[in-house]
């Protein structure tokens, strides 16, 4: 059927987040079928032939791009497999003024400017949108001009989740799932009622002079969300001290400097602990062996934990 070889959807890029506020481009994807199958849908193929083929046939760097011009050159079948069956997925823009996590339909083609989290759990949303993950991201992200650049290898893959197996945080921490959904639902209502996107919403969120009830409520929910994240880690002793504080990014509604330092110290310690557990299980032996056999293709996984840099792990 048509659904097996042609996919229609929104083209998701960082400027179209969230899609409920600003519509993105439309995308036609002729899946991974060969030319005979693609030609079963001549109207769709004609559009691609007119708009895509002229650029692809002169591509000097990819034989596949020239010969299979009707296909996405760098399709991500592993991503499509990961999100199959999910009711939603979470999306993080690679470059943005504020760190934000959005909810998206899975019927989209995500651009390189976005990072897709293959999960539908609002517990995962709460954890990633919390100040805990934001602090980790700010410490290890790269930058583009004055904005942060979210790099999954440095910001996500190294981030230690509350448990070694974070596959079902919703069941392990139901209150975290509940506050994540409540926070997201209220944020959507704020944007819908004001007809403003994420950047303008968080401009208000971090503005000490903004005292509107809906923004105040968003701050209160963020405090509650951060506390539930702390509880998930077992760090009930933390005094987070939410307020307007001076940071490297400017004035932000965040936790105190003392709390920021303590949170980062604990996350780094937990990262090192997880890495040591993985080394003991032999999970990094294959990476080191692969690294030795691949000259000039990247650094092999370190055998020792660096006390200043987080180590990448396969469990988080």
Image: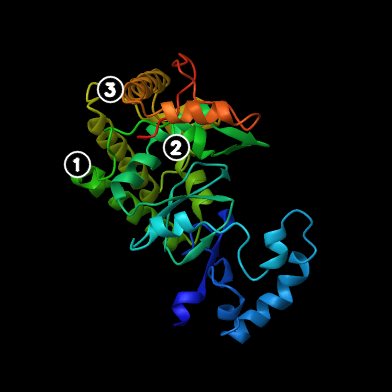
Residue at 60% from the left image edge and 81% from the top image edge: 44
Q: Earlier in the sequence, mark 1 or mark 3?
A: 1
Where does residue 33 sit, x and y in percent of width and height?
54, 72
How far apart in space, not on screen, are marks 2 and 3 (Cα)? 23 Å
Look at the image and name its color scheme: rainbow
| Residue 71 sits in quarter | bottom right
In this rendering, position of residue 43 left or right of residue 281: right
Q: Earlier in the sequence, mark 2 or mark 3?
A: 2
Residue at 68% from the left image edge and 68% from the top image edge: 69
In this rendering, position of residue 120 left or right of residue 261: left
- Label 1–label 3 contact, CB within 8 A: no
Q: Nearer the viewer, residue 70 or 48?
A: 70
The secondary structure type at the circle numbered 2 is: loop
Residue at 28% from the left image edge and 35% from the top image edge: 229
| Residue 166 sits in quarter | top left
Q: Earlier in the sequence, mark 2 or mark 1?
A: 2
The secondary structure type at the circle numbered 1 is: helix
List the residue tagged with mark 3.
238
List the residue tagged with mark 1.
172
- Label 2–label 1 contact, CB within 8 A: no
- Label 2–label 3 contact, CB within 8 A: no
The secondary structure type at the circle numbered 3 is: loop
How far apart in space, not on screen, are marks 2 and 1 (Cα)? 20 Å
């Amino acid at each position: 059927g048509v659904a097996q070889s042609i996919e229609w959807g929104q083209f998701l890029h960082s400027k179209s987040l969230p899609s409920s506020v600003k519509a993105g481009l439309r995308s036609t994807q002729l899946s991974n079928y060969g030319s005979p199958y693609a030609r079963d849908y001549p109207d769709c193929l004609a559009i691609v032939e007119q708009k895509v083929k002229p650029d692809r046939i002169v591509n000097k760097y990819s034989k596949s791009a020239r010969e299979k011009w009707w296909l996405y050159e760098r399709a991500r079948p592993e991503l499509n497999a990961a999100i199959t069956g999910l009711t939603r997925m979470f999306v993080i823009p690679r470059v943005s003024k504020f760190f934000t996590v959005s909810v998206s339909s899975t019927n989209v083609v995500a651009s390189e400017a976005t990072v897709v989290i293959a999960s539908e759990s609002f517990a995962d949303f709460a954890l990633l949108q919390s100040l805990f993950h934001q602090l980790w991201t700010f410490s290890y992200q790269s930058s583009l001009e004055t904005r942060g650049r979210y790099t999954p290898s440095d910001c996500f893959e190294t981030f230690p989740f509350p448990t070694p197996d974070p596959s079902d945080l919703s069941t392990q921490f139901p209150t975290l799932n509940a506050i994540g959904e409540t926070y997201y639902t209220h944020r959507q209502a704020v944007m819908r009622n004001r007809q403003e996107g994420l950047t303008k919403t968080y401009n208000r969120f971090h503005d000490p002079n903004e005292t509107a009830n809906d923004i105040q409520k968003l701050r209160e929910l963020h405090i509650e969300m951060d506390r539930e994240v702390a509880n998930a880690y077992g760090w009930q002793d933390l005094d987070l001290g939410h307020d307007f504080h001076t940071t490297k990014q400017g004035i932000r509604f965040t936790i105190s400097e003392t709390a920021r330092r303590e949170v980062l110290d604990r996350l780094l310690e937990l990262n090192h602990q997880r890495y040591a557990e993985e080394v003991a299980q032999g999970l990094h032996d294959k990476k080191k062996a692969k690294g030795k056999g691949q000259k000039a293709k990247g650094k092999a996984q370190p055998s020792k934990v660096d006390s200043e840099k987080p180590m990448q792990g396969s469990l988080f």
